Amino acid sequence: MCGIVGYVGPRESVPILIEGLRKLEYRGYDSAGVAVHEKGETRVVRCQGKLANLEKQLTVTKLTGSVGIGHTRWATHGRPSETNAHPHRVGGVSVVHNGIIENHMILRQRLMATGRKFSSETDTEIVAHLVDAELKAGVKDLGDAVRNALKQVEGAYALVVLSDSHPDRLVCAKVASPMVLGVGEGENFVASDIPAILSHTRNMIFLEDGQVAELTAQRIAITDLAGRPMSPPVKSVVWNSTQAEKNGFKHFMLKEIHEQPRAVTDTLRGRIELEQHDALLDEVQLDPATIKKIIIVACGTSNHAGMVGKFMIEQLARIPVECDLASEFRYRDPIVGPGDLVIAVSQSGETADTLAAVKEAKAKGARILSIANVVDSSIPRASDGALYTHAGPEIGVASTKAFTTQLIALALIALHLGRKNGKLSKEAAKQFIDELLQLPIKMKEVADQAAPLQVLARRYGNARDFLFLGRGINHPIALEGALKLKEISYIHAEGYSAGEMKHGPIALIDEHMPVVVIAPKGPGYEKVMSNLTEVKAREGKIIAIATRGDQEIGSIADEVILIPECASVLSPLLTVVPLQLLSYYVADFKGTDVDQPRNLAKSVTVE
Ligand code: G6P
């Protein structure tokens, strides 16, 4: 999510750190900072906002020294501010960190009980405290102090530690967040992503989960968390800098589609309570006893997430939910007021229409909860509570991982409301949680099916129109599939409820019309099958998204893309992935500007 760069060697570190952070700017961030060893002491400079602010600050506070760490932060815990920016310094220990410390609340309380004081709202500061506590307790080796500290930490991290007590080295570690070491001559580097250090060396070590590396100018020593030596291979990276930014993928959108299993894991992280079979959503304080009805407001892809959320909440918590396009909401004098919960869904947190809807609902006395990917953006700020998705920065204009993480946030809300009002039994909740936790693996399985979707893209990529059909909870996914195709391939596409086909779109169907049908096993399956016979009778070309093991669908569909079995209420998280890939490969086949499609913007701040 955020960017990390570290350097140890004979050169001045600040220019290397800034240059490296600049190479990671494309990922998006809201604050930045560096820490440099200087004559026995580490000095830290941090700033809210862009790297230019940091550079300006560094002309006032000049740092010199040849061992340093730098960071660009994309806020997840705690808003974007100078105090929340990394590096975090506690005692003589400075830390930069990417990822999420899952047990941060317990650790923070434990550390506070020993008299430790916190100066930020971040989970990262905890790591600095833990390492400092180890050193103060007499641990001599910085590597040992970091290993001991990390044994207490649960979650995802890529982190680099600098300590006044060991001025010649950096200690790095990672679990579930990327981290790469650059092997130089008489100097060494560490970064969260290859582009940050590619101009200095192509020899890289990709740290594995649970590994801890100690870097001095002359050597790199790697161990596992127990301190046993490890020797991962040094690999030569042949990518150019643009390829490296996209992690080897041709476009950001494709990279982001493949990041979804990780993004979903991050959004779930720390939010499941396994003993009570509940979702831990302390940040939003939901009480179903005070909620008469829920209204979800959103635009574009986020609106489709909201429509799926309606099914989830109604099914699990039996609370009535309405979905409204934010751009329509306030112009129809909505019936909303005290006792209503309005959920605003927005990846950017800045969409003008959604913000206006929030203000309207608030003025009428409703409680507002927002789901957003950008911490402290306008919509969360205007809300009573915010549930942040942890998708990380999304660069492709067509939303993919932001969408699936919104679905996870809505699923967690549905689970929590259902548990709190007793509509969801322990057993049903347990099963739902099991299914939720299996999603990342299943999503990866689906995303790995590139080849058949590439074939389909070539076969149908010249069509003038596409129809997308789905029922129930997969009706919004039909809308989303059509939207994705329109957005990036410029092919006209319509999403329809399969049951509505006979009331209009059927007139369009002939042998030139590809019809994408979302037909996972579950409620509505038989009905969708009968809609398909109607398509077939008019010689439409059927591309079906179906559940593995479906023996029937192959006899009627021209093409079948299979997804693993899963609970129907969560099936949108799987069915949407092949639709994202289909749109992507059609657009790529047509040679459009996939990441920045014409006329579209990532964040629409005008009404
Ligand atoms: C723009 C983006 C879409 C997004 C919509 C709503 O149109 O291109 O991808 O779905 O805005 O944005 P939001 O940030 O509120 O989710």
Image (cartoon, rainbow, N blue to C red):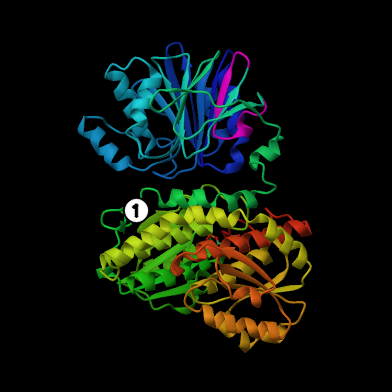
Instruction: Using a 10 Å C-alpha cutoff, classify the residue at mark 1 as few (fewer than 14 neighbours), some (14 to 19) or many (20 or more).
Output: some
Q: Can you tell which quarter of the image residue 435 is in?
A: bottom left
Q: Which residue is mark 1?
A: 272
Q: Position of residue 310 (x, y in %)?
A: 43, 71
From what the image shows, is residue 201 above or below residue 557? above
Left or right of residue 561: residue 265: left
Q: Position of residue 454 (x, y in %)?
A: 71, 58
Tell me the residue at 20%/34% (across/down). Answer: 113
The magenta stretch spans which residues? Answer: 185-199
**What is the three-letter code of the residue carrying label 1?**
Ile
Q: Position of residue 376 (x, y in %)?
A: 44, 50
Q: Position of residue 393 (x, y in %)?
A: 54, 47
Camera-side residue of 332 and 102: 102
Report the number of numbered marks: 1
Tell me the residue at 50%/69% (across/down). Answer: 326
Camera-side residue of 48 and 423: 423
Tell me if residue 4 is in the magenta stretch. Answer: no
Q: Which element is circle 1 on? A: strand
Left or right of residue 411: residue 195: right
Quadrant that contains the C terminus: bottom right
Q: Is residue 368 visible?
A: no
From what the image shows, is residue 88 above or below residue 408? above
Camera-side residue of 432 and 492: 432
From what the image shows, is residue 595 above or below residue 223? below
Of all residues, the one furthest to the bottom in this rendering is 503
Ligand 1 in which quarter = bottom right
